Image (tube, helix red, strand yellow):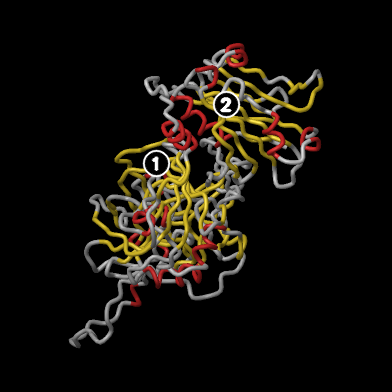
């Protein structure tokens, strides 16, 4: 039987490398924009000759003062699931961008636009928005190409020289959702900075000190002539460090995106989440309709825990996720594992293959076993109101249990008057749990001495014999990302419709024994069992 990867219910700690996404949303230094006045002596004499017409008029921006005309503010409207806030219906977030050519092709960040229901764009600080559509995105490079309705737009060109430390640069955009254009000044402080974050994995970025804020995402970093040096995407105001996707990296990706194709993307707006111990994966805030992720059945609020068997985000970044995508073609079939946090279900399927389906629910497994044996589980009891984390007195053991199991004992694990390890028990009434078959509860213990006394998990389980009160339901192997062993199921304990599950497991290094015993009285306890077995952890 297959079992889920080890994941806590989400106590999300988003790990980043110390930068804050400069996205969707003030003060900033504004660079003076006083244009030079032409000398009247330079005015050519009047002539009857018609003006030359063989040189086409260009809409390319040729000065710092004109950068505003080709810089855009983008509002992405839609519904998103935030890992900290939860579901946000009909939400609107704002970012920046810039126009690449007069037809209205523009650049921004993937995290600004992916998964949005509609986009509205203000060009150069206009009062009225224009509609736009997404042509292509790159989740890993955090870039997107959009097409703005209309044509004849002013546009920015790329900086043609070297990008060295000390180059004067200016960050243009609309930070903090403010409709007023902002330009801040700085220099390139590092020509090759690290580009791994919890929302992107960029190969080439530059560090600069031209202040950017949330809302500057996707806006241009330009030189003193108004030419684009990079695409702003991240910043850390506390250390005065700001980051832009460097020109050469951006051009390489954008040329592909302009062809109506995505690059290193499955169609999600996501971020790496981890608590540093057992939560690892890519949190999905939104899904692009018709994308590989959408066709596989990935939903907003899911956590993608593994791709092609590789556990993701173990370092708190998108690096592993993006390395897998870069190692495959867009239409390759790839195995994907998802934790559907809302229902605590583990699902497996394929991108460009079979749809996601639930692979394991301990509650469902035991429910089916009970039905097969003619045991009528009590399904009339309402589910528990929530779950809380309990620990033993040392803080080594943690496990999530129903909040109604408020009677908790975290004292040492004692056998025959000898301390053999640490333990924690929880129940609505611990005395009832320990002395009757009618009170649900849990015992969770870990011992580094008992593992040496017993050679196998089977020997441990053989000692825990409840045949005088229960009917033995058999033994099954158990394994997850951290532990492996076996579990026994006992039913009809004390003549009641009760299930008693005993799990014995250890780590790959076999350095300690884990024992989990759960008494299940009704259907709500079956649901609690899934939480318990998905969250028990020994913090070594």
Q: Is residue 452 above or below residue 528?
A: below
Tag 2 near tag 1, CB within 8 Å:
no
Specify the quadrant that holds the C terminus: top right
Please provide percent x and percent y for residue 385: 44, 22
Q: Which mark is residue 369?
A: none
User: Count of labels shown?
Assistant: 2
Query: Mark 1 highlights which residue?
Result: 81
Q: Quadrant of residue 156?
A: bottom left
Residue drawn at 43 percent across, 26 percent down: 375
Image side of residue 161 versus residue 62, left or right: right
Image quadrant of residue 396?
top right
Q: Residue at x 32, y 68 (%)?
A: 260
Helix, strand or loop at mark 1: strand
Q: Is residue 206 above or below residue 212?
A: below
Q: Residue at position x 55%, y 37% from top?
A: 534
Identify the element where label 2 is drawn.
strand
| Within-10-Å neighbours for mark 2: few <14, some 14–19, many 20+ | many
Q: Can you identify the residue that label 2 sits on?
A: 518
Q: Which residue occupies the foreground of this view, 161 or 310?
A: 310
Residue 427 x/y as whole percent? 57, 18
Mark 2 or 1: in front is 2
How far from the left and from the top, in percent, is residue 422? 73, 27
């Amino acid at each position: 039987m297959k079992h889920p990867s080890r994941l806590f219910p989400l106590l999300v700690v988003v790990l980043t490398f110390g930068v804050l996404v400069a996205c969707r949303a003030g003060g900033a230094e504004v660079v003076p924009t006083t244009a030079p006045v032409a000398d009247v002596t330079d005015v050519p004499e009047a002539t009857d000759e018609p003006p030359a017409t063989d040189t086409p008029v260009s809409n390319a921006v040729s000065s710092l003062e004109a950068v505003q005309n080709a810089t855009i503010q983008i509002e992405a409207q839609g519904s998103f699931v935030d890992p900290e806030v939860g579901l946000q219906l009909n939400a609107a977030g704002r970012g920046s961008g810039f126009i690449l050519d007069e037809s209205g092709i523009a650049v921004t960040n993937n995290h600004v636009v992916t998964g949005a229901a509609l986009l509205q764009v203000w060009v150069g600080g206009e009062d009225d928005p224009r509609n736009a559509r997404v042509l292509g995105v790159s989740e890993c490079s955090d870039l997107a190409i959009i097409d703005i309705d209309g044509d004849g737009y002013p546009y920015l060109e790329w900086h043609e020289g070297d990008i060295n430390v000390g180059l004067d640069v200016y960050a243009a955009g609309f930070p903090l959702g403010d409709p007023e254009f902002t330009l801040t000044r700085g220099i390139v402080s590092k020509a090759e900075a690290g580009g791994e974050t919890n929302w992107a994995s960029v190969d080439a970025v530059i560090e600069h000190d031209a202040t950017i804020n949330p809302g500057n995402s996707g806006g241009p970093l330009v030189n003193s002539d108004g030419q684009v040096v990079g695409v702003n995407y991240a910043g850390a105001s506390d250390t005065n460090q700001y980051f832009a996707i460097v020109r050469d990296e951006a051009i390489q990706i954008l040329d592909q995106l302009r062809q109506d194709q995505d690059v290193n993307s499955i169609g999600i707006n996501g971020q790496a989440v981890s608590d540093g111990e057992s939560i690892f994966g890519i949190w999905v805030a939104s899904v692009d309709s018709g994308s590989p992720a959408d066709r596989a059945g990935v939903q907003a609020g899911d956590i993608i825990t593994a791709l092609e068997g590789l556990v993701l985000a173990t370092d708190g970044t998108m690096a592993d996720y993006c390395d897998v995508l870069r190692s495959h073609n867009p239409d390759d079939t790839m195995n994907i594992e998802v934790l559907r946090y809302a229902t605590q279900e583990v699902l497996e399927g394929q991108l460009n293959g079979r749809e996601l389906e639930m692979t394991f629910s301990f509650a469902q497994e035991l429910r089916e076993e009970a039905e097969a044996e003619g045991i009528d589980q009590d399904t009339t009891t309402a589910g528990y109101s929530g779950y809380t984390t309990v620990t033993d007195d040392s803080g080594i053991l943690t496990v999530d249990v129903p909040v109604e199991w408020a009677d908790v004992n975290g004292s040492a694990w004692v056998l025959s008057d000898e301390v053999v390890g640490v333990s924690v028990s929880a129940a609505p009434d611990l005395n009832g749990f320990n002395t009757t078959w009618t009170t649900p509860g849990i015992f969770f213990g870990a011992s580094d001495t008992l593992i040496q006394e017993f050679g196998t998990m089977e020997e441990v389980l053989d000692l825990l014999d409840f045949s005088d009160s229960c009917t033995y339901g058999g033994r099954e192997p158990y394994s997850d990302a951290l532990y492996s062993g076996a579990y026994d199921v006992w039913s009809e304990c004390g003549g009641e419709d009760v299930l008693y599950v005993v799990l014995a497991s250890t780590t790959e290094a076999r350095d300690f024994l884990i024992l989990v015993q759960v008494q299940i009285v009704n259907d709500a306890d079956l649901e609690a069992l899934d939480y318990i077995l998905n969250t028990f952890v020994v913090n070594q």
